Image: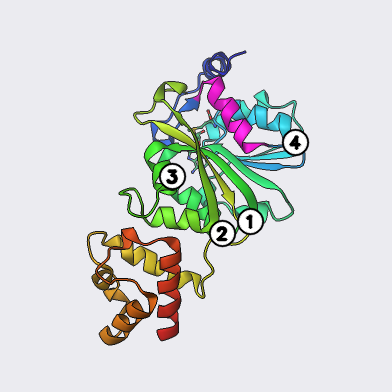
Amino acid sequence: MSIDVYTRDIVKRYGFKFSKSLGQNFLIDNSVLEDILGSADVSSDDVVLEIGPGVGTLTRELLKKAKKVYAVEVDSTLIPILKEELKEFDNFELINKDILKLDIKEILKEENNVKVVANLPYYVTTPIVLQLLNEDLNFKSLTVMVQKEVGERMAADPGCKEYGSLSVLVQYYCDIEIIRKVSSSCFVPSPKVDSVVIKLSKCKNPRVTIKDKDLFFKIVRFSFNMRRKTLWNALKPLNIDKEELRKIFEICDIDPKRRGETLSLDEFGRLSDFIYDFI
Ligand code: SAM
């Protein structure tokens, strides 16, 4: 059966009303579903964390492949639907919570080989990805549908207009691949924006070795907070003596007239380590 028919049938039978504010756009295109599953490459050894199962279209396919699926859904009206429709699976754990208020580390503490697979609610994509990356969770990969612009920002290279602190943060932890574009007609109801499926594969070690992660991200944030400013001006809030700052740029071999948006991860790392040594 096509997932268009499957999904619309469940929505109709239960009289489910879509909530725009919860980012409810359900997937109805089989080729997109197959590409998500193909790229996530879930096997019977894997544990999956799905965020926002909706009526369970993707969940059902994940349950057939994975050792266990944890699905976190904030909308209470979807819980009885999911319980009923997926009752034949004993490897399913449904959690009725807001993912941003959940202690994911605690829930997954006994699990290995965790893969995150989801068609994410767009209004909270960035906080969800940041939470998953920052909490140092032990996941192998994250295969998710996101708004096209957000996916492009995550994958952007230095010098592109899309390059920003989100690009640095994602690329610090992960290799990123844009799997495919997805048009708005692949969802019910159709969102106003296009989407992409992306895969983030967690690197064994972060891409750059740095002395102080908090300082590194602080410098990245300052550099992009004022994108149009030179590094010299953008880093003023660090309150470093002017002469010392001049020396730091000189030793790093980074021109202080450059803007943060032109710096590679390595350059941010170098700058951060020299600043660490000076302060
Ligand atoms: N997985 C389904 C699919 O592919 O058709 C539904 C995807 S829909 C884009 C996003 C889902 O995330 C909805 O079911 C929505 O209720 C849920 N959601 C929204 N905000 C959430 C949050 N903060 N925590 C957990 N789930 C959330």
Q: Secondary structure at mark 3?
A: helix
Q: CA distance from mark 2 to mark 4?
A: 25 Å
Q: Return the disc, 3 or 4, that comes first in the chain's sequence.
A: 4
Q: Residues within 10 Å of mark 2 (few under 14, many from 20)?
A: few
For the residue carrying disc 3, how many other residues have a C-alpha within 10 Å: few (<14), some (14-19), or many (20+)?
A: few
Marks 1 and 2: in contact by CB < 8 Å? yes
How many angstroms separate mark 2 from mark 1 (CA)?
Answer: 8 Å
Residue on which the image places disc 3 = 124
For ligand 1, tell me if the residue under mark 3 lies within 8 Å. Answer: yes
Q: CA distance from mark 1 to mark 3?
A: 19 Å
Is 91 placed left or right of 51 in the picture? Answer: right
Please provide the residue range marked out in magenta: 27-41
- Pinpoint residue 199: horizontal percent, then vertical percent: 54, 42
For the image shown, how many numbered marks are present on the structure?
4
Residue wearing tag 2: 135
Precedes in sequence: disc 2 or disc 3: 3
